[in-house]
Image (cartoon, rainbow, N blue to C red):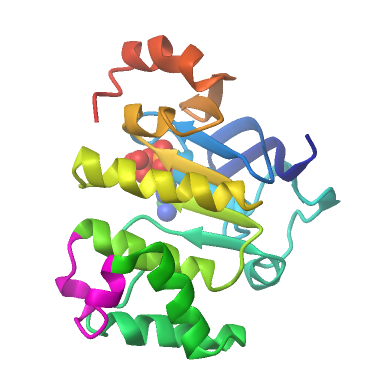
């Protein structure tokens, strides 16, 4: 499988402190890859590098087989890289409809944006005139995903999708994420608590203190993760 997104021997730092010590990771179209690890392991930094918002100190970032190391985030976004940050990235004081409407900068008409969102997440249609801040955590995450889909991403980067959500809601969200991947999107998802995402990921990697400790089939990583006390979510 040809990777769409690839990190090769990536090192990164905040000021003089190196936090990633040679990360190798690749995601193909149609694949969900989970990057798991404890607090402070370097998961968010890895996503920020993939989106071009944090520089590498060495190593390379590749997109569709092309070296894009150092390419500014707006250009990576134009090339189809979409980061959904932790905390969901919706505008809490705006309605669901207006949150979607803001994505018309993509050139898609409002009706199409609503169609994309409401066909995948019918509950959002019911909540259309509600302000996003009053939605449940799961619904906010759905709205964030729907906004991400508006850009027709080739690569979707998801940070802690499951944060603070009930297991049933998490499973529902991951079913949609798998479905999005099946349509040809390369999905890289970061989670601290592992079990839910392991059921849906095609490949998983465990990162500890800025190094990939192990990667492979999600089932083969359960023991590794249990020993890291990564939990039961
Ligand atoms: P968490 O789940 O807590 O977000 P993480 O695995 O995503 O953890 P990162 O956020 O990538 O980890 O952090 C990796 C390391 O970099 C940590 O030691 C963290 O303290 C440090 N770090 C992260 N952001 C900054 C920053 N803006 N300035 C300085 N150090 C930072």
Q: Is residue 224 visible?
A: yes
Q: Quadrant of the C terminus?
A: top left
Q: Quadrant of residue 224?
A: top left
As drawn, the residue found furthest toward the right would be 66
Residue 61 point in image, percent of width and height: 73, 47
Specify the segment rendered in magenta: 123-136
Q: Quadrant of ligand 1?
A: top left
54 versus 214 height, above or below: below
151 versus 1 height, above or below: below
Q: Nearer the viewer, residue 13 or 130?
A: 130
**The magenta stretch spans residue 129:** yes
| Residue located at (29% from left, 44% from top) | 170
Q: Quadrant of the N terminus?
A: top right
Left or right: residue 169 versus residue 44 is: left
| Residue located at (56% from left, 35% from top) | 20
| Residue located at (71% from left, 42% from top) | 6
Left or right: residue 77 versus residue 94 is: right
| Residue located at (53% from left, 53% from top) | 180
Q: Quadrant of residue 79?
A: bottom right
Residue 35 point in image, percent of width and height: 49, 34
Q: Is residue 162 visible?
A: no
Q: Nearer the viewer, residue 37 or 201?
A: 201
As drawn, the residue found furthest toward the left would be 134
């Amino acid at each position: 499988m040809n990777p769409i997104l690839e990190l090769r021997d990536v090192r990164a730092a905040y000021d003089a402190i190196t936090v990633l010590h040679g990360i190798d990771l690749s995601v193909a179209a149609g694949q969900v890859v989970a990057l798991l690890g404890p607090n402070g392991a370097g998961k968010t930094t890895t996503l920020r590098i993939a989106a071009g918002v944090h520089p590498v100190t060495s190593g390379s970032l590749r997109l569709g087989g092309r070296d894009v190391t150092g390419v500014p985030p707006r250009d990576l976004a134009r090339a189809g890289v979409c980061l959904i940050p932790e905390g969901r990235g919706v505008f809490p004081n705006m309605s669901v409809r207006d949150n979607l409407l803001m994505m018309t900068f993509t050139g898609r008409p409002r009706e199409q944006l609503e169609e994309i969102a409401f066909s995948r997440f019918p509950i959002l249609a019911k909540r259309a005139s509600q302000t996003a801040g009053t939605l449940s955590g799961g619904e906010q995450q759905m709205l964030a995903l729907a906004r991400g889909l508006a850009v027709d991403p080739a690569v979707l980067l998801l940070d802690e999708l499951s944060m603070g959500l009930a297991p049933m809601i998490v499973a529902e969200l991951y079913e949609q994420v798998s479905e999005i991947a099946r349509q040809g999107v390369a999905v890289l998802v970061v989670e601290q608590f592992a079990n839910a995402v392991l059921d849906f990921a095609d490949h998983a990697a465990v990162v500890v203190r800025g190094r990939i400790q192990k990667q492979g089939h999600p089932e083969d990583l359960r023991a590794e993760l249990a020993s890291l006390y990564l939990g039961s979510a």
